Amino acid sequence: MSLIAVGTNHKYASIEIREKLFFSKKALKKALTCLSEQAGINAAIILSTCNRVEVYANVSDADWCKGSLKSFLANYKEIDLSTLEPHLYTYIGKEAVSHLFTVAAGLDSRIIGEYQILEQVIFAFDEAKKAGCLDNILRDLFDRALKTSEKVRKETGIGKGDASIGAVAVNLIKDKVDCLEGKKILIIGVGKVSELLIAQLKDQKASMIFVSNRTFEKAKELAEGAGAFAIKFELLKEKLQEADIIISTTSSPHFILKKEDLLNILRKPLLIVDLAVPRDIDPRVKDIEGVELYCLDDLNFIIEEDSIGKEPEVRKALRIIEEEVDNLCNSTGFLELERAQAL
């Protein structure tokens, strides 16, 4: 038996690659079932977020199965393996354990210490349980990863400050727009990120915030709770020419706004921030005069500035993770796993 992790993240792959690999919540169960049927795969979990897609598996032969897992990702997502493989990393045995613990603690995130990744790890774990794709090795591994994440956040200041993509997006907007007061802002999509965005924008005294979603009741609920305004999704395109700023955060597999939707309707400059993966906004939109378009990968310069000063807390967190990884790998079951790696 061998533990293996194969995947990619924002450090190794552009948004163009990551959005092709992305597994939606609806697609995850089918993908897990297909993965578990692969020869040599005893148990598996798929972690899919805006910034990473990773497969964690307990396999019969790591050297053979790492190729099998890479082929699974390429074939399932209809990507040529020769195109995908340079963007993939592989961790085996103790390295796979260490990588997962680092991911769950938010140390491998685009925003160091962000909390959303913990929720995403929990979701991936739960979906694998529902799909019947777990064994004791993966169950123990993820249980310990979650506990270690909680310990890191409790004993270090890694998550202090505005460790969220919403805060970073608002910082970008502030950098591009001198003053948000009096600006009309349209948020497309509901969810945690949208909630954080509205709170941040309210603090900046944005005058008119509109929320739109395919399910109007969800948009209405979010808007009413935050003092914003809900608009029906079918009226979205009519509202575009009124907006100064658009922020999109949906989980749609297709573009919400295409270049054709904005052509010939703009009456003033428009700033668009696309926080979705797959992307919500057609990248050709940036070719329209007067439009500035930014996606997740364009936020790095602000994220790097926000990360300055966290190095001491990162070192503390890494020491905790190293200790917890050693404890797990030396325990019953995982000790056998590590011995198998050495043979």
Image: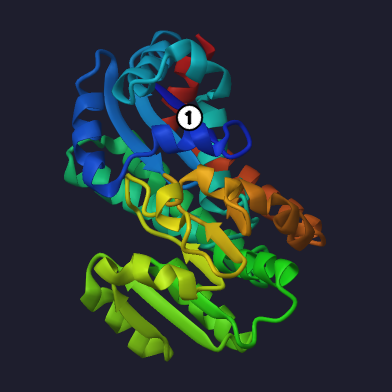
Q: Is residue 39 left or right of residue 204?
A: left
Q: Residue furthest front?
A: 264
| Residue drawn at (42%, 91%) of the image | 227
Query: Circle 1 is placed at which residue position?
Result: 7
Q: Position of residue 300 (x, y in %)?
A: 69, 50
Mark 1 Cα shell of 10 Å, populated few (<14), some (14-19), many (≥20): many
Q: Quadrant of residue 219?
A: bottom left
- Say if 61 sits above or below 114 in the image: above
| Residue drawn at (51%, 34%) of the image | 16
Q: Is residue 169 left or right of residue 63?
A: right
| Residue drawn at (62%, 70%) of the image | 170
Q: Is residue 332 visible?
A: no
Q: Position of residue 328 (x, y in %)?
A: 49, 40
- Say if 203 sits above or below 66 in the image: below
Q: 98 or 108: nearer the eye?
A: 108
For numbered disc 1, what is the local secondary structure? strand
Q: 143 or 82: nearer the eye?
A: 82
Q: Position of residue 95 (x, y in %)?
A: 57, 29
For the N terminus, the quadrant is top left
- Say if 59 sits above or below 199 in the image: above
- Say if 241 sits above or below 334 in the image: below
Q: How many numbered marks have been drawn onto this rendered protein structure?
A: 1
Q: Is residue 63 visible?
A: yes
| Residue drawn at (41%, 59%) of the image | 119
Q: Position of residue 278 (x, y in %)?
A: 42, 44
Query: As shown in the figure, which amino acid type bears the numbered disc 1?
Result: Gly
Q: 85 or 259: nearer the eye?
A: 259
